[in-house]
Image: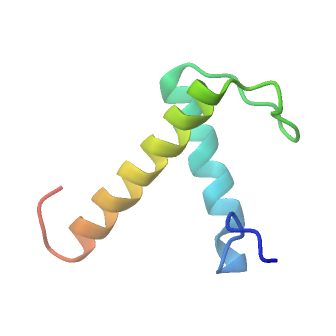
Amino acid sequence: MKNSNSINVPEARQAMANMKQEVANELGITLNKDYNGNLSSKDAGHIGGNMVRKMIEAQERAMGGKG
């Protein structure tokens, strides 16, 4: 069974980690370098949701749309 959280482009792994850290910092959420199992579901959701928002905005700009 494939993990749905796997990164399809291995070269993007570090960029995703950097984005996660950047978003967490913007939200005032402290992330540990390796393990974040103590992170609340609410905080994890805020981080993930904001990451998706940023990725959509970047894609819209790349496609010439508003964003």
Res. 6 image quadrant = bottom right
Q: Is 66 located above or below residue 37 in the figure?
A: below
Tell me the residue at 22%/66% (across/down).
Answer: 61
Give the percent coordinates (x, y) of residue 50: 43, 42
Give the percent coordinates (x, y) of residue 40: 68, 23
Determine the residue located farthest toward the top in the rendered image.
28
User: Depth check: 33 or 5 in front?
Assistant: 5
Which part of the image, by quadrant, shows the N terminus?
bottom right
Determine the residue located farthest toward the front in the rendered image.
1
Give the percent coordinates (x, y) of residue 41: 64, 29
Q: Disc count in the image? A: 0
4 sits to left or right of 63: right
Q: Is 46 located above or below residue 15 in the figure?
A: above
28 sits to left or right of 9: left
Which part of the image, by quadrant, shows the C terminus?
bottom left
Res. 55 image quadrant = bottom left
44 sits to left or right of 32: left
Tell me the residue at 65%/79% (across/down).
Answer: 8
Res. 60 image quadrant = bottom left
Determine the residue located farthest toward the right in the rendered image.
34
Give the percent coordinates (x, y) of residue 34: 88, 41
